[in-house]
Image (spheres, rainbow, N blue to C red):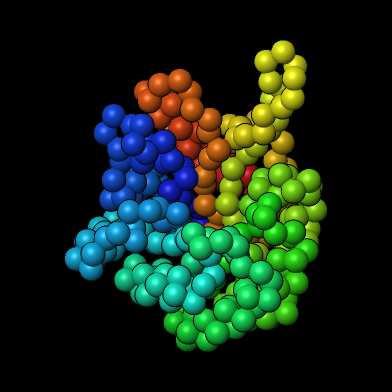
Amino acid sequence: MIGLGTYAFFWEHSERARTPLSLVGAFERTRELGADLFQICDYAPLEAMDAAELADAASAARDLGLVIELGTKGVTPDRLACFLDLAGVFDASLVRSMLSGPDGRATLAEADRWLRGALPRFEAAGVALALETYEQVATADLMSLVTAIDSPSLGICLDPANVVARLELPQDCVAQTAARVVNVHAKDFAFDRQPGWVGFTYSGARMGEGLHDYPGLLEAVRPRERGINEIVEHWLPWQGDPETTIRTERDWTRTTLDYLRSIR
């Protein structure tokens, strides 16, 4: 299934927007664009909502016919327990996380211990925990962790754009993780020369116009055949003013959806 995530509305959610988009507003926009899936990922207001607000948001998603996934940062026992409980509220079957969180970055030994302690509850609830490929942890180390624990509820959230900052090649990240991927973040990326030709900026690109070999990812991972969801997000730099930035963000979202729907 192809869906949208919070990062597809990064600037429209932010305080820089004239009228920031609410979570339910993002749900409604997702439905208007013909998508049936939304990933609430790294959305700070979620953890500040009380029980009634959470129930209202979950009800709005159900009324719109949306499947919900969740995303957080960190693998401490309290954080994993919190988001498993939130998954129950939203009927979510996947939580994305990473080893780095608000309390720092877990060592591989800590992550191994905490994940082994938490995963029986995830397994019992039928919820997958997807650890994202990220520059803070080598892809080989992340895969070693997932392979060693070998839980049916633990896998990889594949975002090959992130590992470039670690001087890993996106194609290598895809190849290493393909067998364990349970979630995909879909965005394009590129390098642009800085003014004066002094260095580069690495950031997002309009889908299909950057460096991402997304057809190669589809061939290696086979998400559509394996029932793995693809979540649209962006690395859109600020465009100078809210109107231009949000207009461009919306254009990138439509373009990415059209691109993903057009390729097999």
Frontmost residue, 169 versus 208: 169
Residue 110, compared with residue 45, is above or below; it is below
Residue at horizontal 49 percent and vertical 77 percent from the top: 77
Residue at 68% over, 20% down: 194
Q: Position of residue 171 (x, y in %)?
A: 78, 49
Q: Nearer the viewer, residue 251 or 49?
A: 49
**Percent coordinates x, y for residue 95 in the rendering:** 49, 67
233 w.r.t. 121: above or below: above
Quarter of the image holding residue 78?
bottom left
82 and 263: which one is in front? 82
In percent of width and height, residue 119 lies at 54, 81
- Can you give x and y, in whole percent of width and height, for residue 41 in the image? 45, 55
For residue 196, above or below residue 212: above
Residue at 57 percent of width and 66 percent of height: 130
* Residue 226 seen in this snapshot: no
The residue positioned 29% from the left and 56% from the top of the image is 64
| Res. 163 visible in picture | yes
> Above or below — where is 2 with respect to 103?
above
Quarter where residue 190 is shown: top right
